[in-house]
């Protein structure tokens, strides 16, 4: 495993696939990247979070804007943007998912990151590029951030919505891993699924990394992790023991009411392009 992409410190191996930088706490896996798979039971959480993201974006702008979403999945964010009358272009790397999106929405393009083809027709096109639970699945993140500058306009911004290694759920799962119960930790990394997580940031090291690569943070907050409903379906999509799923569903139902005062599990950051090259 190479040096940390944030602070150049050496990684420490935590288990058979996760490495940790002890200086900045960045986590990286050597799991094999792939195309995404929607997790069942999270549509309510996603839609509520997307409404909040859109509300914040609109509060920052006094003009019409153009957004590109990277990895649109089932199209929930596109749907919410359409309701809010925002010009949204969706994208997918997977051909099958792309075809499904094109049946539902008008402005859909095939796009994978890092770019492996010319995107000259997108140069200086977008006011915002948004990653909804996608950034943590990507390879070559420094290259990705640099490439995005070419398709953002001069005042362009990126929005990152991704899980946090400082969150309560991650901390509990990591504690269980240390005593030999690895199922929940593996689930957070989506180990064994079609598109596992390749990285885990916290709010501090994410800011350092993105700022290092030519962006200025203009907003930092968090999003909700669980809803009151459909937690069983969400868990059962990867944990097939129904007793465990019912038990954890009750825990998540309680967690819903306490999550506002507990360590946050989802990072929500907005960064503005500064055109400063990385070191």
Image (cartoon, rainbow, N blue to C red):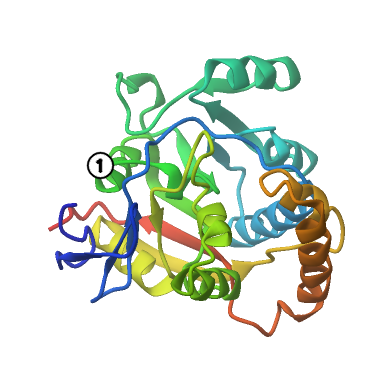
Q: Is residue 68 above or below residue 276?
A: above
Between residue 119 and residue 39, name the one nearer to us.
Answer: 39
Give the left or right position of residue 50, taking residue 167 as reference. Answer: right
State the residue lying farthest toward the front.
Answer: 180
Between residue 175 and residue 272, name the one nearer to us.
Answer: 175
Q: Where is residue 148 in the image (x, y as percent from the top left)?
A: 35, 40
Secondary structure, mark 1, is helix
Give the left or right position of residue 73, taking residue 191 as reference. Answer: right
Between residue 46 and residue 42, name the one nearer to us.
Answer: 42
Q: Is any atom of residue 42 visible in this view? A: no
Q: Position of residue 91 (x, y in %)?
A: 54, 28
Q: Quadrant of residue 115?
A: top left
Residue at position x 76%, y 65% in the image: 248
Q: Name the residue under label 1.
A: 143
Q: Is residue 58 above or below residue 178?
A: above
Residue at position x 45%, y 51% in the image: 158
Q: Where is residue 244 in the image (x, y as percent from the top left)?
A: 76, 60
Q: Where is residue 15 in the image (x, y as percent from the top left)?
A: 34, 60
Q: In which quarter of the image is residue 48?
A: bottom right
Location of the C terminus by quadrant is bottom left
Give the left or right position of residue 191, taking residue 210 as reference. Answer: right
Neighbourhood count class around disc 1 (C-alpha, 10 Å): few under 14, some 14–19, many 20 upward: few
């Amino acid at each position: 495993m190479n040096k940390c992409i944030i602070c150049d410190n050496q990684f420490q191996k935590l288990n058979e696939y996760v490495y940790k930088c002890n200086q900045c706490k960045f986590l990286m896996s050597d799991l094999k990247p792939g195309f995404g798979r929607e997790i069942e039971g999270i549509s309510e959480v996603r839609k509520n979070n997307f409404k909040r993201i859109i509300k914040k974006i609109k509060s920052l702008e006094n003009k019409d804007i153009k957004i590109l979403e990277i990895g649109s999945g089932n199209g929930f964010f596109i749907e919410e943007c359409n309701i809010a009358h925002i010009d949204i272009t969706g994208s997918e790397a997977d051909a099958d998912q792309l075809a499904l999106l094109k049946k539902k929405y008008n402005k859909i393009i095939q796009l994978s990151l890092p770019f492996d083809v010319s995107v000259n027709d997108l140069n200086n096109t977008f006011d915002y590029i948004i990653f909804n639970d996608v950034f943590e699945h990507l390879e070559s993140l420094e290259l990705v951030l640099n490439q995005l500058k070419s398709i953002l306009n001069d005042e362009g911004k990126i929005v990152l919505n991704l899980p946090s290694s400082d969150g309560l759920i991650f901390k509990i799962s990591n504690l269980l891993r240390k005593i030999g119960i690895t199922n929940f930790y593996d689930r957070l990394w989506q180990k064994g699924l079609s598109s596992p997580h390749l990285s885990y940031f916290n709010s501090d090291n994410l800011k350092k990394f993105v700022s290092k690569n030519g962006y200025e943070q203009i907003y930092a907050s968090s999003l909700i992790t669980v809803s009151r409903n459909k937690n069983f379906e969400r868990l059962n999509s990867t944990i097939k023991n129904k007793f465990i799923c019912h038990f954890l569903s009750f825990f998540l139902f309680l967690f819903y009411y306490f999550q506002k005062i507990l360590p946050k599990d989802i990072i929500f950051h907005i960064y503005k392009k500064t055109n400063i090259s990385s070191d």
